[in-house]
Image (cartoon, rainbow, N blue to C red):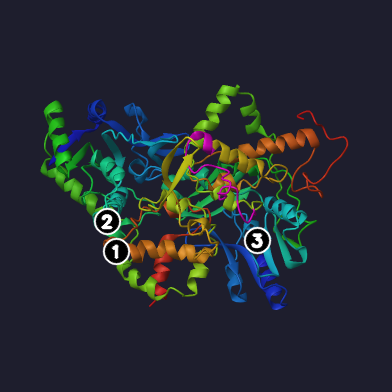
Amino acid sequence: MEIIVPKDKLKDIFENIKERFTVFAPQKDGDKKLLSQVKAFKEVDLSILKTQSSLKELLFPRFEILFDYKWNKKEITIKEDNVVKPQVVLGIRACDIRGLKVLDNLFSWENIKDNLYLERRQKTVLITQSCLKPDSFCFCQSFSISPVGGEGGEDINFTELSDCYLFRSFSYAGEKLLKELIEEFSFSLPADKDKKAFEELKEKTTTSKIANIEELAIKIKRNFYHNLWKDISWSCLNCGICTYTCPTCHCFDIVDESNDREGRRIRCWDSCMFSHFTAMASGCNPRETKESRFRQRLAHKFSYFPENLGIVACTGCGRCIELCPAGINLQKILTKLGRECS
Amino acid sequence: MKELQNIVKALFKEDKIKSVLGYVTEDYFYNVKPVKISKIEDSEKLTFNPFCVYNLVTYLKKEKDFPLAILVKPCDIRALRVLLLENQLVRSNLFIIGLNCKGIIDKRKITTLFHLEISQIESAEILDRNVKFKFNSGKEILEDIEKCISEKCLVCKDRELEGDCDIVVGEKPAYLPSSEDFLEVKELEALSLEERAEYWNKAFRDCLRCYACIKVCPLCYCENCFVDKTTPQWVAKNYEIGTLRDFHIIRAFHLAGRCIDCGECQRVCPVNIPLRRLNQKLRKILKEEYNYTPGKENEIFLGSFSPGDPDRFL
């Protein structure tokens, strides 16, 4: 379903949604670009192309309590208290939606359901915004993502046309929401000129594109011991920026925080870039060098993950390039791997 | 640039070094990368421009392939001095090439100035109080220096390289900033306790615990960092505000008497936490109480004692 929303009516839509859902949207806080809860429309900043932290944080938070427990000499009591409220995420981009697709596959892999993630996912309505001006870090088209959005995964997508917004729905929940909005505000359906304008924008918007990404799956495996790994990982500092801002990275750690009477079990993010990630109690560490950790991250994204779950675990959002403290450029590395490996 | 490349080439030819740590530019002018070059023909790629922000001394922490040459800016040399004082490096293993520096451009600042146009910058040159940007289109823009260069460069008054370097290249800056020292710290000190707590809680709240601040610090060289220690555990694994605050305060404290203000921790932070301010506070106390500036003295601060040291906090 498609509708046309005049530019000044966006605020009314926001107010309407806000009454029923907790709303998250990109917002500026000083020089930070955050994806956080918004209470008033003026806090929403749709000009932000990419928030520093990706959409994954709202569904797979940095840390969450799995359960609390108490014990005495006789018994142990466990308390699970995970209330998930319905939420709307507004103004995110197509690359982050692809990131969720990756996480969806993972958190329900071979019917092992991660209920915490899936429940949040089910109660989240995603309203994406078309990218009309991708930056030089973006390369989502390499993964057949359209920057304009609408490949599925989101509930609603909206595109800024010259004098209005075009809203399109892609799911039952999205269609339902649009129908409610039509009833409330009597929005019109798009005219031919709007459709044409949209098609033109879609055609015009492009990002960098890396050829033959799917070939990397086998190339990386074949060249596990290639010299270039040392070369490309030399400047890596082994911090966790690329993994923590990545919309698809999903490794976590589970720890107990307890004293002699009570405690809690929490799940928190972890990163394959840290040497302690693979350190074992015996003192052995299978990925001791920075080169091996760097290779692991790329191999997981472009080789092991697609092999096991049928989808490349990169969305071309470019956050890792933009934020890398050592100037490592994933686009360049992928091109180099494609060129120099057989 | 030619001067720098020729020096490195000569060093390779004379077999004085095995490799050099330097900077190269990739595609866009502003995209500078730290590199380790081990072949004489690659030294042609070496460059130095106002985007060479990386403190290459960080890469010496894990380096085993000596002797090598390293490019250092005046702020980086201070880190090198501390590492040498703390016996982490052997001076004769290094050939230090000093780079006279007029300031380093803060990418965040110019991204707010030029937005997407940043990729079209063809060159940038610092002229006294202005920065001249040339764009692909031929357009030239003159911007005020304060709007473009890093916070740390605005207070960097000591740009002496000669004493510690084997060779120094480039021309000395004609203009040095006149900004007052510790300005940001003084601003914070003027706030009430509650306001300060709110300021820092808000700053730490977004911390991802990516530990980039630790990994990039040239002076954080512990084999086993406190954040990784599990028996006993120093810092909990969760992301509650108290934990995040503990983590950042411990990190800053481990640099007390050592932090040389290269500003790298603040530059790399993906969520823009003003980390430099924590360390600046420590530097301010050191300056006021002991008249000690890390990276300038010939003694380790915590390893020295004078009967006249103030002990008001004991």
**Which mark is on residue B60?**
3
Within the image, what quadrant is residue B157 found in? top right
Amino acid of disc 3? Leu
> Residue at (65%, 54%) from the top-left corner?
B221
Within the image, what quadrant is residue B143 found in? top right
C-alpha gap between disc 2 and disc 3: 43 Å
Amino acid of disc 2? Trp
Give the residue at mark 2: A109
The count of marks equals 3
Amino acid of disc 1? Asn
Q: Chain of mark 1?
A: A
> Residue A122 in the image: x percent, y percent?
23, 41
Give the residue at mark 1: A308
Q: Earlier in the sequence, mark 1 or mark 2?
A: 2
C-alpha gap between disc 3 and disc 1: 39 Å
For the residues labelled 1 and 2, say whether their Cβ atoms are less than 8 Å apart: yes
Stretch of the chain drawn in magenta: B221-244
For the stretch drawn in magenta, the main secondary structure is loop
